[in-house]
Image: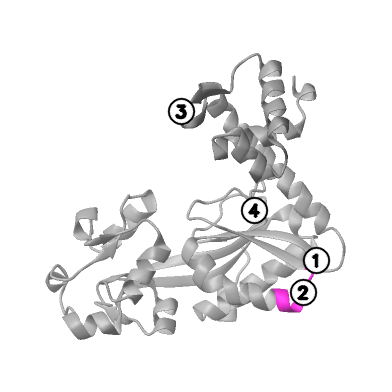
Amino acid sequence: MASKIPWEWYRSFLAVLDEGSLSGAARALDITQPTVGRHIAALEQVLHRSLFTRSPSGLRATQLAHELERHARAMDSTAAALERAAASADEAVGGVVRITASEVVGVEVLPPIVAALRAQHPALMIELALSNRVQDLLHREADIAVRMTRPQQEQLVARRIGDIELGLHASDAYVARHGVPSTVDELTAHALIGFDHATPFIRAATRTFGNLTRESFALRADSDVAQLALIRAGAGIGICQQPLAQRGGLVRVLAERFSMRLETWVTMHADLRQNVACRTAFDALVAGLVEYIGASADDVVEPH
């Protein structure tokens, strides 16, 4: 069956899943709507099953479509990785490198690093995939990842940068209006900024920060960038990376009681070590993050 199904059909299938209609998929792919329709019809004919049903809101995916989605996404990632590898195959530092990082690191830390890298190598194209989800380097969802956990896969090249300290912080404006709590008990009288939905990482972090629960927070957002913006705007007290807080002039709150360290790594697939573009971007990220954290040269080590 696989030999009968061109990749373009799966590409249209994913676009319809994402957009919810043939017309939306056509716009996203920059092809005609009849072409998308033919791809979906041909795919359904080969599979002998329906992938979508019509509803007032558009096309609704069937159970089969949901079952196929994960495999089609993997194919999409592989196809994108092939394109990046082909574009970066020359010895000159050019082509495409896809970097994944958390939202805060991607928005607050990486831009000057990427800007300096591009200034030095203007033929290099960078794709930033920002998500708190850990993207899979082994399946080449990205070429390089900035991660806050030690990588476990042996197929990855990894450099340990050091530890980023997290602490509670507030803006000068908030402190001027409400003061600084001197005890944990006093903290309950302040507006706290935190998560809306808990994840395993958040649950571990809140245990470190005194078993804070969702109900503890007057302002809730699952986006780390949104939480940081609220802290800077003077809305309350929230968790922030210490280097960011120092850069932005935020006030540390109860430093002796609330502290957590994130082990920080830059990783990439071992197959990319000979790729000049990926190796150049990897080295630039390591150097830039070492400067951001304030790590010493001894903090940068290769795992065994």
- The answer to which of 225 and 24 lies nearer the viewer is 24
Q: Please say if 192 is above or below 13.
A: below
Rounded to the nearest whole Å, what is the CA distance between mark 2 and mark 4?
Answer: 20 Å
Rounded to the nearest whole Å, what is the CA distance between mark 1 and mark 4?
Answer: 17 Å
The magenta stretch spans residue 122: yes
Q: Secondary structure at mark 1?
A: loop
Q: What type is the residue that disc 1 sits on?
A: Gly
Q: Secondary structure at mark 4?
A: loop
**Mark 1 or mark 4, which has the lower sequence index?**
1
Q: Which residue is mark 3?
A: 56
Q: What type is the residue that disc 4 sits on?
A: Ala
Q: Residue at x 75, y 24 (%)?
A: 2
Is residue 8 something one can see in this rendering?
A: yes
Contact between labelled residues 3 and 4, with CB atoms less than 8 Å apart? no
Q: Please say if 239 is above or below 137.
A: below
Kindly report which numbered mark, 3 or 2, lies closer to the viewer in this rendering: 3
Q: Report the magenta residues as a range.
A: 118-123
**Mark 2 or mark 4, which has the lower sequence index?**
2
Q: Which residue is mark 4?
A: 142
Rounded to the nearest whole Å, what is the CA distance between mark 3 and mark 2?
Answer: 50 Å
Q: Secondary structure at mark 2?
A: loop
**Mark 4 or mark 3, which has the lower sequence index?**
3
Contact between labelled residues 4 and 2, with CB atoms less than 8 Å apart? no
Kindly report which numbered mark, 4 or 3, lies closer to the viewer in this rendering: 3
Contact between labelled residues 1 and 2, with CB atoms less than 8 Å apart? yes
Local packing at callout 4 (Cα closer than 10 Å; few below 14, some 14-19, many 20+) is many
Q: Quadrant of the N terminus?
A: top right
